[in-house]
Image (tube, rainbow, N blue to C red):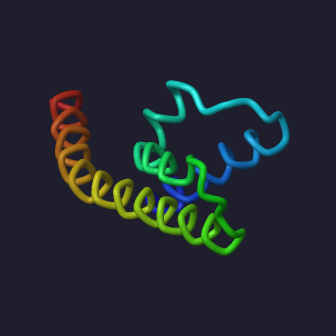
Amino acid sequence: MWGILGLLIPAAFLLHWKLTDSPFGELEAILWPSSILSMGLEGPTPRSTLDIAEVFAVLIAENVLLYSLVGLLTCPFAFLFFRWRRRSLID
């Protein structure tokens, strides 16, 4: 589930960017941290569409891995916390 969220967030940001032509902001940098690496596409050297697609595919894959890792690390603690809280409410 976390990996799907890691895929949907960059897709939504890319769609918003393409439809509104607005630059990425602070929220995008927080929710899609690997997007900062897209600065490698800037510069005087022209890039092909394939190069741009490849860079964005790698950045989205990195985000999916990051979200999955965060989910794997936080879900066990959240489960224990809510289980402990439920027990304390029953007692």
Classify residue 81 as left or right of residue 59. left
* Residue 20 screen position, x and y as percent: 83, 34
**Please, which residue is most extreme toward the right here?**
19
Question: Is 73 situated above or below 89?
Answer: below
Q: Which of 69 and 43 is in front in this view?
A: 43
The image quarter containing residue 19 is top right
Residue positioned 45% across, 62% down in the render: 3
| On-image quarter of the C terminus | top left
* Residue 83 screen position, x and y as percent: 21, 44
Classify residue 86 as left or right of residue 22. left
The image quarter containing residue 8 is bottom right
The mark total stands at: 0
**Please, which residue is most extreme toward the front here?**
44
Question: Is 13 situated above or below 20?
Answer: below
Q: Nearer the viewer, residue 17 or 80?
A: 17
* Residue 60 screen position, x and y as percent: 51, 60
Question: Is 83 situated above or below 25?
Answer: below
Residue positioned 52% across, 28% down in the render: 27
Residue positioned 59% across, 50% down in the render: 10
Residue positioned 60% across, 50% down in the render: 44
Classify residue 64 as left or right of residue 76. right
Q: Nearer the viewer, residue 28 or 70?
A: 28
* Residue 82 screen position, x and y as percent: 25, 39
